[in-house]
Image: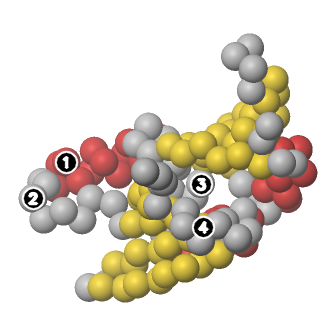
């Protein structure tokens, strides 16, 4: 029996800014762009990996949450404390430079961690933390 990760979900607060980061800076394919009731869901993923995708969704759209809860969620997203994802690249330094050139929000430059990983970190336009590891 095989189990694979098919979708991971991260909130976005601006669909065009999210596309600018995930499509234009990271180079992901856009696999879906669905609008409903003035909101937009984007599905993106790495080229050549059609079974692994990230769904970028409008945050706090559940009708069961209060306005105060919605505001708290938006504040946590902006702070970088709501969603996170770790990616890997076979050229960490090259990807880091490309993201810097595209104006990405750097949290940590590439460095060797004491737990045996070389990585860097960025925030996407919504504030989600993305760590990128050097692939083994």
Using the numbered discs, state the Cα–Cα distance from disc 2 to disc 4 in whole angstroms. 30 Å
Residue 86 visible in the picture: yes
- Which numbered dot is residue 124? 3
Q: How far across and how far down the image is residue 100, in percent?
A: 81, 53
The residue labelled by disc 2 is 64
Disc 3 vs disc 4: which is toward the camera? Answer: 4
Considering only order in the chain, which callout, 4 or 2, is on the residue closer to the N terminus?
4
Pointer 4 local density, CA inside 10 Å: few below 14, some 14–19, many at least 20: many
The residue labelled by disc 1 is 69
Considering only order in the chain, which callout, 3 or 1, is on the residue closer to the N terminus?
1
Considering only order in the chain, which callout, 1 or 4, is on the residue closer to the N terminus?
4
Considering only order in the chain, which callout, 3 or 2, is on the residue closer to the N terminus?
2
Q: Is residue 50 left or right of residue 54?
A: right
The tally of labels here is: 4
Secondary structure of the residue carrying numbered label 1: helix
Secondary structure of the residue carrying numbered label 4: strand
Disc 2 vs disc 4: which is toward the camera? Answer: 4
């Amino acid at each position: 029996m095989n189990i694979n990760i098919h979708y991971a979900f991260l909130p976005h607060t601006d669909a065009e800014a999210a596309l600018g980061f995930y499509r234009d800076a990271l180079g992901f394919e856009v696999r879906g762009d669905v609008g409903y009731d003035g909101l937009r869901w984007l599905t993106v993923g790495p080229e050549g990996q059609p079974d692994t995708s990230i769904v970028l969704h409008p945050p706090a759209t559940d009708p069961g949450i209060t306005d105060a809860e919605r505001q708290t969620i938006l504040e946590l997203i902006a702070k970088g404390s709501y969603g996170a994802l770790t990616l890997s690249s076979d050229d960490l330094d090259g990807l880091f430079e490309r993201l810097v050139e595209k104006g990405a929000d750097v949290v940590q430059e590439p460095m060797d961690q004491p737990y045996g990983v070389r990585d860097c970190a960025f925030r996407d336009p919504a504030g989600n933390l993305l760590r990128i590891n050097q692939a083994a």
